[in-house]
Amino acid sequence: MTLIEKIEQTTSYIQEILREKPKVGLILGSGLGVLADEINSPQIIPYNEIPHFPISTIEGHAGELVCGELKGKQVLAMKGRFHYYEGYSMEEVSFPVRVMKALGINTVIVTNAAGGVNTEFDPGDLMIIEDHINFAFSNPLIGKNYNELGERFTDMSNAYDKGLIRIAEEVAKLIRMKVRKGTYTFFTGPMYETPAEIRLVKFIGGDAVGMSTVPEVMVAVHSGMKVLGISCISNMAAGILNQPLSHDEVIETTQMVKTQFISYIKQILLKI
């Protein structure tokens, strides 16, 4: 079965369930799925019921689509995502973004929990993603290109929409919240980076590291969608504080900032 056929089957299945047509897509990372609990009149579709959808296997990823109204916008939220390190292909990891586009969504907000490389950052900070570095050395656009999905050669020079970044900055000022801006660096995982790798990331201009987001953003840009990326700095990366790293710390930090995170994304939705 071709990618186009899979997209069509999945889209048709979801369309038959939804009462409203979503306008904004939300991809919620580790520990950040609480935002989906704020959606009004939610329609919840477990991933395991959706044709061709992978299954989330990581703690902090509920594994369901939540559709409904949030701050006057019809949204489709991924409460949990898929990762390359789970054994899924890059095409599978980014497949939900293809479906979002087919459903008529043209704006996507992508969130993640990330390790801080910039030593001016603190755990709990929110970082607007301005750009990314792909250290996975693979991507979901490799292979057959379907012109109806996007151009063969995709311009990534403005992957993160400058207009959306401007809105995110304005909202932060409006609610008097400190936000960072920076470059997100994508590693495959599932192991955390070594101190030497973090020194390299810092040297080449990375501000945060993580194991997601970039494949989804690449497909969103290929599809002609506008992207806003937000990282929650959940811990400082390897070698910076000379302490062990754990997923428990990631979840603990995202729980600590969940109220701030929810408020921030809600106010951004009001402006887009």
Image (spheres, rainbow, N blue to C red):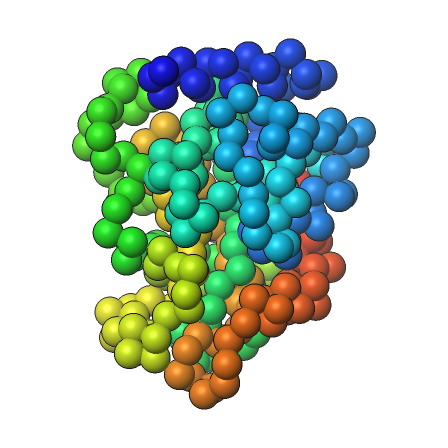
Left or right of 171 in this view: 89: left
Seen at 51% across and 75% down, the residue is: 245
Residue 185 position, x and y percent, is 35, 60
**Is the C terminus in the top left, top right, bottom left or bottom right quadrant?**
top right
Q: Residue furthest right?
A: 41
Seen at 70% across and 68% down, the residue is: 256
Seen at 49% across and 43% down, the residue is: 82
Q: Residue furthest bottom?
A: 242
> Is 41 placed above or below 14 here?
below
Residue 255 position, x and y percent, is 70, 63
Q: Nearer the viewer, residue 15 or 220?
A: 15
Whether residue 3 appears in this view of the structure is yes
Left or right of 154 in this view: 234: right
> Is 155 placed above or below 192 here?
above
Residue 202 position, x and y percent, is 31, 74
> Is 224 placed above or below 216 here?
above
Left or right of 49 in this view: 91: left
Query: Across the whole image, how many numbered discs are drawn on residues?
Result: 0
Left or right of 13 in this view: 225: left
Seen at 59% across and 38% down, the residue is: 78
Whether residue 124 appears in this view of the structure is no
**Is the N terminus in the top left, top right, bottom left or bottom right quadrant?**
top left
